[in-house]
Amino acid sequence: MRQNPFATIAKYDGDNTAIKNPRLLRKQLKNLKAKQQNLSRKKRGSNNRKKARKAVATLHAKVANCRKEFLHQTTAEIVKTSALIAVEKLNVKNISAYGGGHKKGLNREILSAAPGMFHQMLKYKAEEAGVEWIEIPTRQVKPSQTCHACGLQEKKPLAQRKHECGCGAHCTRDANAAKVILNWALSGNATGQELAGCGEVALAASMKHETPSINA
């Protein structure tokens, strides 16, 4: 079974790092559905229904606490090893607003990964540590559709996880997007053709927080 990363980091030295997606909600889905079904069977106003409702709330709280702990640890590590962090500007409301019933599972995965909270934590920790923070204009740069090597833009379906360009560039979709983000943050263009004049940026890193696929 394919596992899409939670986020992919591209560094100025050419190194790429993929952060594993913990899939915290998915791991508890079976248990959560069982508790919700048990709740639906209890008589309204009864003590048993109150207990069943509390059991559902407790499980939701457990998942939320695990998510916060994961995000705190992950963002702290990223900030500790970076002098500049570049990310794409996210609009979580927009990316999870459309698609109808067939997109329900995908939206659940997006919200479970908490991209908005991830960027928020990363930003305030970067500011506290004096790490430069850059948000690139996603609609203008289109990191998922742009080649980091030559700048060619070509639409890719979400299921396409490899980036292969006629110029010879070949890497994962996420690594390519992260490189585009980093190039833009450092030089103002997708291919990084002006990086020679950017000074010492060995600790610069960019983040690609990819929308997961439902069957990942």
Image (cartoon, rainbow, N blue to C red):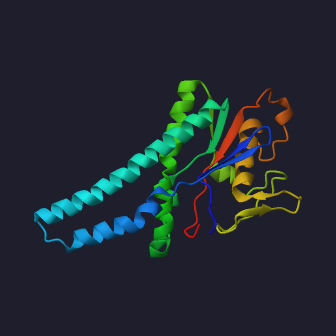
Residue 54 placement, left or right of 25: left
Place of residue 120 in the rendered image (x, y in percent of width and height, measured from the top left): 50, 40
Residue 54 placement, left or right of 26: left
| Quarter of the figure that contains the N terminus | bottom right
State the residue in front, 189 or 108. 108
168 is higher (above) or lower (below) than 132: below
Residue 54 falls in image quadrant: bottom left
Place of residue 59 in the rendered image (x, y in percent of width and height, measured from the top left): 33, 56
State the residue in front, 164 or 57. 57
Place of residue 10 in the rendered image (x, y in percent of width and height, measured from the top left): 72, 44
Residue 97 seen in the current view: no
Residue 157 placement, left or right of 25: right
- The total of numbered circles placed on residues is 0
State the residue in front, 104 or 45. 45
State the residue in front, 101 or 138. 101
36 is higher (above) or lower (below) than 73: below
Residue 25 seen in the current view: yes
Q: Residue at x 69, y 38 (%)?
A: 205
Residue 12 falls in image quadrant: top right
